[in-house]
Image (tube, rainbow, N blue to C red):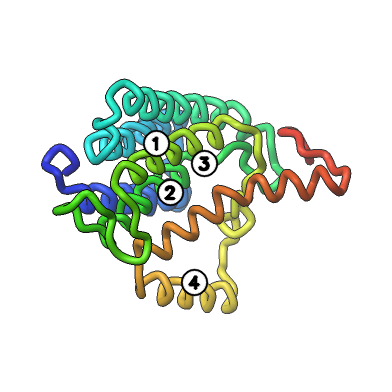
Amino acid sequence: MAIDQEFEGAAVAIFVAAVLDSLDGRVARLTNTTSDFGAHYDSLADIVSFGVAPAVVGYLWLLKDLGKLGWFAVFLYVAATALRLARFNILAPKTNNGFFYGLPCPAAAMLIATFIWTVIDFGDFDTIYFSGPLALPQPWLIWILWFVFIFCGFCMVSLLPYYSFKDIKSRKSVSFVVLLVIAILIAVVSQDPSTILFLMFLFYSFSGFVVYLLKSRKGGHVGVFEE
């Protein structure tokens, strides 16, 4: 889609990939089809969906105008995605404290995809200006996108703690309150999917910094193997 200049559709496709990625493990467990092959193949799929795909979309959309600097940003992002997945495969069996260390790749990809999706929803690319309430000259927009790629790459390879939501996924049944929250969340997101999802993933990307500072301030252990 990005090659055909259908950038909004490409961003939505990355969102669909993130939704499916949240379901594949549960489906494998429910059907008793988990395997080491599946785990490794999942990582390869994640590199494509959440590493290569966002990089291609971002580069063809705006970053190509920066030449080598644009190429550098997307290359760094893809490399960080691969490193993040490799580290996750090693550390996941050894950590059990409700946190991921480093921004998860789907969340990083969603931050980029929803940013692009939101800009296109508000934007008018018949001019060099980004119209709407977030009006900016397009050169500024290119550098913001460049920074988003660098920021996501840094967060993925960092050891910042991000809440994993594993305690919710591990439950066999879901409480009424959780179902109500999910229903409300769907209703809210449906009002303006691109913008609300972007704000959600932006908040999540910064939550690692907040949790790290709070734990450090309380004198708690913030290492990978915290129990």
Measured Cα–Cα span from mark 4 to mark 2 = 20 Å
Mark 1: amino acid: Trp
Q: Nearer the viewer, mark 4 or mark 2?
A: 2
- State the residue position of label 3: 104
Residue 123, horizontal then vertical, whole percent = 25, 58
- State the residue position of label 4: 182
Which quadrant of the rendered structure holds the C terminus? top right
Within 10 Å of disc 3 (Cα), the crowding (few <14, some 14-19, many 20+) is many
**Label 1–label 2 contact, CB within 8 A:** no
Label 3: state its secondary structure: loop
Q: Between residue 209 and residue 176, name the one nearer to us.
A: 209
Q: Is residue 1 left or right of residue 91?
A: left
Q: Residue at x 82, y 39 (%)?
A: 221
Measured Cα–Cα span from mark 1 to mark 2 = 13 Å
Label 4: state its secondary structure: helix
**Which of marks 2 and 3 precedes in the sequence?**
3
Which quadrant of the rendered structure holds the N terminus? top left
Write down the quadrant of residue 91 in the picture: top right
The extreme left residue here reads 4
Mark 3: amino acid: Pro
**Label 3–label 1 contact, CB within 8 A:** no
- State the residue position of label 2: 111
- State the residue position of label 1: 146
Q: Nearer the viewer, mark 3 or mark 2?
A: 2
Residue 99, horizontal then vertical, whole percent = 66, 45
Write down the quadrant of residue 135 in the picture: bottom left
The extreme right residue here reads 219
